[in-house]
Image (cartoon, coloured by chain):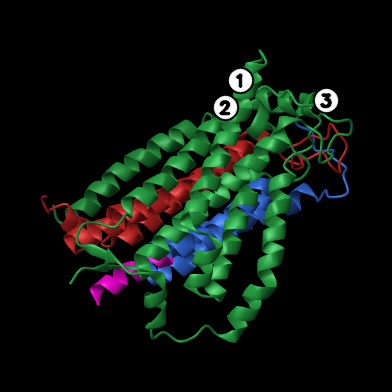
Amino acid sequence: MQIFPFIVVAWILGVGLYGVVTSRHLVHQIICLIVVQSSTYVLLLGVGYVTGAVAPYFFDVPNHTPAVDPVVQACALTDVVVEAAVTALLLSFAIQAYKRFGTLDPQELAALKG
Amino acid sequence: MNTLAVHTPYTVPVAMMDALQVTLLVLVAVAATAVVLIRVPARQVLMLSVYGVLLAVLFLAFQAPDVTLSELTVGAVLLPAVLLLTLAKVRKKEQ
Amino acid sequence: MTPQQRRWIFLVAGTGLVAFYLWGLSGLPGFGRYPGPYGFAILRVVVAQTNATGVVSAINFEYRGFDTVGEEFILFVAAAGVATVLRRLRGEREQPATSEAADRDVPPTSSAVRMVGLLFTGPVVLAGWWLASHAQTNPSGGFQGGVMLATAFVLIYLSGEFLVFKRFSPIDLTDVVEAVGAAGFAAIGVSAVAMGLPYLKNFLPLGSVPGAVSSSGTIALISFFVGIEVAAAFILIVAELLDQTLLIRQED
């Protein structure tokens, strides 16, 4: 349990990268990129966890209860929403590439010129 | 500042929380592998939705409800909607 | 380079990456043993300093407010990028929405989907609004509330028709709302500068009770602006993609 979450993060990262490298369809590649991004959220939250602590909200627990680290949660929170918009931008590039070249295979797209 | 003697109305034993977290981590790893190994994008989108919900439950077990809310709405609704619209546009061109 | 070669090169390089990652991992203090002083220092002072019980939103909009301005502008630029990339290219025509809807031969929306959409649109809008305006008390905040509001509009499209969706969210109005959200956030920071304080300092009255809706000064106001900006950005993205799918055709 000491390092098991980080090993899972490495696994998700490796699997996602394998999908990106050996993909034959641009949308499949973008979905594998989403998986790679999600591994970083798990890593952020895993670094800040404190065993036996509560969530950092003091509305209904007393004020100085030991809580997990709130800074990495703030990072991960804005990260999730912003990466969704950037993924939409990538998908619009994929649409226009398909209109221009007629194919969605990244290995064929690399061979086209102009 | 690392004490185990937290007594709130919501505390569970540490062993139970550990077991829950290990189970959810294994499920998330299996779901990520499934998302990558499915090659047809239209089916992959559904698996991505399931993966988003599992990831949201994992974040809840890591004591992060804010990130859970974000990941649930984004990963289970908005990203699949945007992906399916792209796939519909690409498929319509093929006809 | 053949796919087989690519696969082998990836396996070699991937093993190297994992080896570096595990080497760096050995320096961490282990899962559950977070030692860092920054998080604990903030937890000690946050309720006394800002009267906000939602610590994560207080960090997002006050302690690290400048980083959040940057993230929000990434979102703004991404939505503007989608609107630019998906414009009508030379050689395409855009049909008006009414004629396209009239002669599409798709099966009509089932009544189960219509009923679920009707029942859930109101509560989803209410929940999104509640999330965006209660940033300082609960696990809420501008980002989550905005995304949930955008989800309500997707529900309108799914259960109704494309025309109804377009009437509820005309692109000009969505653009204006998004700009108001982004500019509002920056303007709050600038008005702090106009008073002689540092950029984005919390200058509104802090309220008396920690965790009340009207407490914590600028945090609630910033969260509201962020909420409407995020909602408008995602509605714009979905509307542009729908226009591409349903309205824009190749000139033939």
Q: Which quadrant is the C terminus of chain C positioned in?
A: bottom left
Mark closest to the chain's N terminus, 2 or 1: 2
What tint does the image give chain C? Answer: green
How far apart are the two marked residues, 3 and 2, measured between alpha carbons? 22 Å
Q: Which residues are magenta?
A: B84-95
Q: Amino acid at mark 2?
A: Phe
Label 2 sits on residue: C66
Q: Is residue B86 magenta?
A: yes
Label 3 sits on residue: C48
Q: Residues within 10 Å of mark 2 (few under 14, many from 20)?
A: some
Farthest top residue? C196
Q: Amino acid at mark 1?
A: Tyr
Q: Is residue C68 left or right of residue C162?
A: right
Chain identifier of the residue bearing label 2 in the image: C
Q: Nearer the viewer, mark 2 or mark 1?
A: 1
For mark 2, give the secondary structure: helix
Q: Are marks 1 and 3 on the same chain?
A: yes
What tint does the image give chain B? Answer: blue
Image coordinates of residue C13 in percent, x first then y, are: 28, 42
Label 1 sits on residue: C199
Q: Is residue B34 above or below residue C144?
A: below
Q: Residues within 10 Å of mark 1 (few under 14, many from 20)?
A: some
Q: Amino acid at mark 3?
A: Ala
- The circle drawn on residue C109 is none
